[in-house]
Amino acid sequence: MPPAPLPSTTMASRHLLRSLAMCSPTTTQAALLSTTRSLVPATPSPRSPLKSDKTLIQTPSTAAPKSTTIRSYHSTTHPPPPPPFTPTEQLLLSAALKHVPTHGWTAESLALGARDTGHLDISPAVLADGEFGLVRWWLWSQREGLKERVKALEKELERLGVEERVEVITWERLKGNVEGGIVGRWQEALALMALPSYLPHSLKELALLADEIIYLAGDKSVDPSWYTKRASLSAIYAGTELFQTTDTSLDQRETRAFLRRRLDEARQVGGAVRNVTEWVGFTGAAVVNILRSKGVRI
Amino acid sequence: MAARPALTRALPHLTSTVLSRSSQYQTSLRSISSLSPLSRTFSTTLPSLDANASTSTSSKPPTPDYAIPDPSRPTHFGFQTVTESEKREKVARVFTSVAEAYDRMNDLMSFGWHRVWKDHFVRTLNPGFSPLTAGPDPRGPQQILDIAGGTGDIAFRMLHTAHVVNRNPDVRVIMSDINRAMLTVGKHRSESLPASQQAALSFLEANAEDLTKARPLVPYPPADPASEEKPFFDPTTATTSIPDNSIDLYTVAFGIRNFSNIPAALREAYRVLKPGGVFACLEFSKADKHPLFNAVYKEWSFRAIPLIGQLVAADRDSYQYLVESIERFPSQEEFRDMILDAGFVIAGEGYEDLTGGVAAIHKGMKPRT
């Protein structure tokens, strides 16, 4: 059965959201902002009921899904959406990926992959976006593979807090680049991804990866930090990956240290911003109260 | 004036929004399409995204009735309803009359933009690309069949990409057309190509719905003006055929719209392609995703193009047919489903819109069984 965001499923889940008024960041945002902003820090919301972790919403879908490639939310109660690649693409691209360490993200790899699977040199012409399709396939398969990697680490992760888990899972994703043997070729892929026509897709993929990592780390926050966390992790991930392409240290220790430093900085900056906002809010309220006590009509 | 009723028939399409088309237009469309072989209901799902799709296509189902050419079956010629054999004759007449002015007219009608589409089409197919390996490809030269090749726009670009860009002279291009007058224009134009490219090119008269009957080009008009040869290919004069599993790349650019029986032509493409071979089609399509742009585009095609045809090629009716046939051609999704129905597998959405959907590239691959 096809799966994915069938209109009815989407409607049902949206309805569920409205009624819970708990899971969607947008529906609760206004209420949280007006009342308990300082009470909802980066830690998991204490009020999250059991149901909320089942539908940690990524983006509330506004229109009926045009194609089955749209993944609008994480769900443990629905089957995962089908891959955004047809069986033909999966066959050709996974075969071509084996040649990337030698030949890069090129038509050469695609043609050699096609030969491996008994196809013709012309067969990759059927793919919609050629070499970039290869990059897309790599990004998607790595993101999908992250779930399995995390499952294998379950015992280790249980002992850690959310922030440490984010670091471990991000590192797992970066290790995928090494194990796939594409670190030496990753700058070429970044060049392709930065082309204006492919940039929107690349950024979306980065956002989805950040979301996947934070989701797998078990973060359940439903306040504005939902956005800031994903934005800062995206930036950190992109930077670390770039660092990784030039890292020659043993077991990529330098990359690991780089990642840890960036995450620590984000934590410090986040704390500082929170302190400043709290101070400004308190001082502001105090000034207003003082003025009111002096008879100013505010 | 012939254009007037045609425009009024097309206008509801422009004035109504994409979501709610006027019921009048829908009923008139239904009455026309109920006669056509395209009236099968198309599924709106993506069959190929289903895991079962690849297995179901591997065993070829028997050819359905609508894919067997039948000279007496009704089809459409522009906004008229005619039989398949009548359409063949009428299309032949249209293209015989426009053959000489065809290239100039294309430039005028599309502001030269058709060149951009064709360049993009050939570039994404990348014909002649071969990975660097020792010695020539043991599987022999790459065979490209350009159906409705007409004046050679696609075939010459293919040769250029293969010989000059990919530096691979091991490519053969067969230019095929049912219309001998068009193909003769193509042959004359090919004489300005480099000799190596001319050597890789051959010309074939054939009907795309039945490629088992073909004949090397005999130029038209014939040297002897007294002979009563027809300007289009007559299957009874066939001397050769295109065998099963012999072609690497099958292309058809701005041609499939004129076929009498599109499902039959798609099945014939499937037959001649090698497993792993690619079917690629460049054709006018629907721009309804952008209502405003679509309105301007429809105004241009129904008002200006027949007029330009009248002024430049002195042939209004042929260009009236051209715009009507574009209007009647199935949408991107419907045509994609027809390709899947013929047994091909697709990647992604299966099509790529060009210039907001005015034209679209559809691609399919014959799966390895």
Image (cartoon, coloured by chain):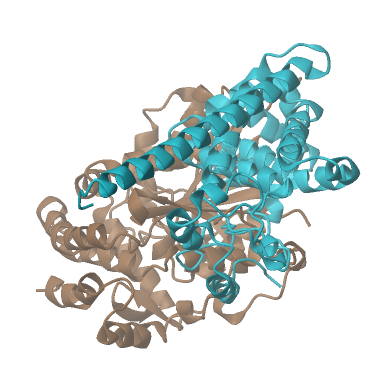
Chain colours: A cyan, B brown
> Does residue B352 appear left or right of residue A149 in this picture?
left
Instruction: Report which quarter residue B255 is drawn in.
Output: bottom left
> Does residue A19 appear left or right of residue B87 in this picture?
right
**Closer to the camera, A280 or B126?**
A280
The picture places residue B84, in percent across and down from the top left corner, at 43, 76
> Does residue B323 appear left or right of residue A278 in this picture?
left
Q: Compared to A34, does B31 lie above or below? A: below
Residue at (80% x, 37% y) in the render: A116
**Closer to the camera, B151 or A238?**
A238
The picture places residue A69, in percent across and down from the top left corner, at 59, 57
Q: Is residue B148 visible?
A: yes
Q: Compared to A71, does A177 lie above or below? A: above
> Does residue A190 appear left or right of residue A162 in this picture?
left
Residue at (51% x, 79% y) in the render: B70
The picture places residue A100, in percent across and down from the top left corner, at 72, 28
Q: Compared to B61, does B209 lie above or below? A: above
**Closer to the camera, A74 or A71?**
A74
